[in-house]
Amino acid sequence: MYIVREQEKFIRIAYTGNISLDERRSAFRDAIAINNQYEGLNKPYIVDMRRCGLANDTPSKEGDFSRDMLKHSPGAPIAYLVPYLYGPNDFVVQLLSDYGIKARNFINEEYAHRWLGIGGLVPDVESGSGQATVRLFNQTA
């Protein structure tokens, strides 16, 4: 299951349970369609993966989706909220770097509030805030 919701300062994509590739493509398409209504002013994407069963996912899949979002919504940062089981050398960082996308340092949610101007950053899909690391990606100039 996925939820795509436009909020005041960002577009939220949230997953719960095991998500199929088709469902993830659909979620990203929905988010890109929302962003396409803004000419030259794209909202950041917040991708909440904390309740998503991605244990068997491969690096190429996540990288392909991230690259596709940046291609269709240039200039819109992507913030991934992921469980702590992923470390600083997570495949997402390396893969995006390989495609010329600058990965910001790993930061906490408090800093993300300030950096993105977001109050009350995305909670879990069901309830509670959970433990998460936030990572922000910007397309290189």
Image (cartoon, rainbow, N blue to C red):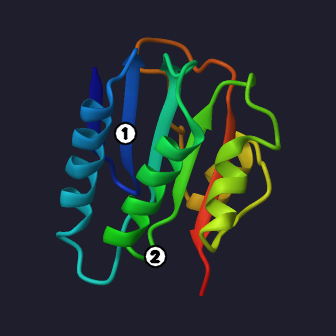
> In x, y percent, where is residue 6?
28, 48
Of the 4 image quadrants, the one containing the N terminus is top left
73 sits to left or right of 119: left
> In x, y percent, where is residue 70?
43, 67
* Dot 1 or dot 2, earlier in sequence: 1
72 sits to left or right of 133: left
Residue at 73 percent across and 62 percent down: it is: 104
Residue at 46 percent across and 76 percent down: it is: 75
Give the amino acid type for the residue marked by disc 2 in the picture: Gly
Toward the viewer: 100 or 139? 100
Spatial separation of the CA atoms under disc 1 and disc 2: 18 Å
- Residue holding disc 1: 13
Does residue 9 lie above or below 47 as drawn? Answer: below
Give the amino acid type for the residue marked by disc 1 in the picture: Ile
- Residue holding disc 2: 75
> In x, y percent, where is residue 93?
70, 52
Of the 4 image quadrants, the one containing the C terminus is bottom right
